[in-house]
Image: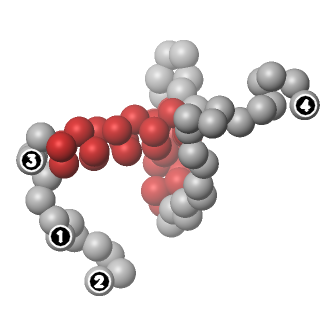
């Protein structure tokens, strides 16, 4: 396995499922940037922003959940 194929032990991977409209919007958002951004980067950025808001007490739960 090459170094670029090895996983970083400090990072964890997981899968998410998006509805088709959100997936398409995410693709369009990334493609509209110069240079284009990967979906993985956009999701990582969104998660970091969510956690920062929570850490700074700018986020309250429960958030609206479509399945609730």
Q: Which residue is mark 4?
A: 1
Q: Is residue 1 left or right of residue 26?
A: right
Query: Please, what secondary structure does the residue beneath circle 1 have?
Result: loop
Rendered image quadrant of residue 64? bottom left
- Which numbered tag is attached to residue 62? 1
Quick check: 23 above or below 47? Answer: below
The numbered mark, 4 or 1, whose residue comes first in the sequence reads 4
| Label 4 Cα crowd, 10 Å radius (few <14 / some 14-19 / many 20+) | few
Question: In this view of the protein, can residue 53 be seen by the observer?
Answer: yes
**Residues at marks 2 and 1 touching, judged by CB atoms closer than 8 Å:** yes
Cα–Cα span, label 4 and label 2: 43 Å
Residue at point 59% right, 55% down? Answer: 14
Cα–Cα span, label 1 and label 3: 13 Å
How far across and how far down the image is residue 4, in percent? 78, 24
The one nearer the camera, 20 or 42, is 42
Residue at point 51% right, 66% down? Answer: 19
Quick check: 32 above or below 13? Answer: above
């Amino acid at each position: 396995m090459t170094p670029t194929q090895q996983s970083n032990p400090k990072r964890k991977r997981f899968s998410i499922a998006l509805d088709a409209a959100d997936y398409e919007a995410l693709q369009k958002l990334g493609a509209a940037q110069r240079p284009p951004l990967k979906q993985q980067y956009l999701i990582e950025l969104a998660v970091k922003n969510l956690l920062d808001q929570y850490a700074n007490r700018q986020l309250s739960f429960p958030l609206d959940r479509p399945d609730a």
